[in-house]
Image (tube, rainbow, N blue to C red):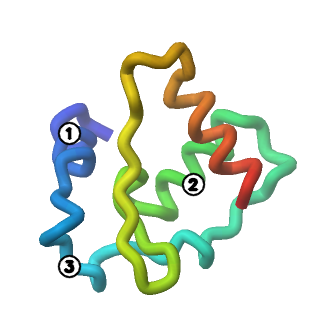
Amino acid sequence: MMFEQIKQMKNVDIRTVEKDTLVEASNIIVDMEMPKIPRMVEMVKKLGNPFCFLCGNVAVKVEYDDTTTATVDDRYEVLLRTQ
């Protein structure tokens, strides 16, 4: 994925996004036996936009606090463990 595409996905406005363009997160199935990095890649591929997706009928936008020591990898690992 190119940096510009990631930047566009990150900048989606949750207030104006068309819900029918978002993926329902609960429908995503990822093999938890896969190694962490391939599992994260698979999750992102299936979500389409890892920053903005649906949970039920609610559009969700994920943002990361850059003041913490947790990395994006750490956050996705938590997300994948709870799926």
Amino acid, disc 1: Lys
- The one nearer the camera, 44 or 54, is 54
Q: Residue at x 25, y 36 (%)?
A: 2
Q: Which residue is mark 3?
A: 18
Q: Nearer the viewer, mark 3 or mark 1?
A: 3
Furthest residue toward right = 33
Badge 1: residue crowd in 10 Å (few <14, some 14–19, many ≥20):
few
According to the picture, the residue beneath numbered tag 1 turns out to be 7
Three-letter code for the amino acid on which mark 2 is drawn: Met
* Cβ–Cβ under 8 Å for marks 2 and 3: no
- Marks 3 and 1, the one that precedes in the sequence: 1
Q: Secondary structure at mark 2?
A: helix
Seen from the viewer's position, the closer of residues 64 and 46 is 64
Which residue: 68% across, 50% down?
Answer: 80
- Amino acid type of the residue tagged 3 in the rendering: Glu
Indicate which label's residue lies in the foreground, 2 or 3: 3
Quadrant housing the C terminus:
bottom right
Q: Which mark is residue 43?
A: 2
| Mark 1 secondary-structure assignment | helix
C-alpha span from label 3 to label 1: 18 Å
**Residue occupying image coordinates x 37% and y 21%:** 66
Across and down, in percent, residue 60 comes to 39, 64
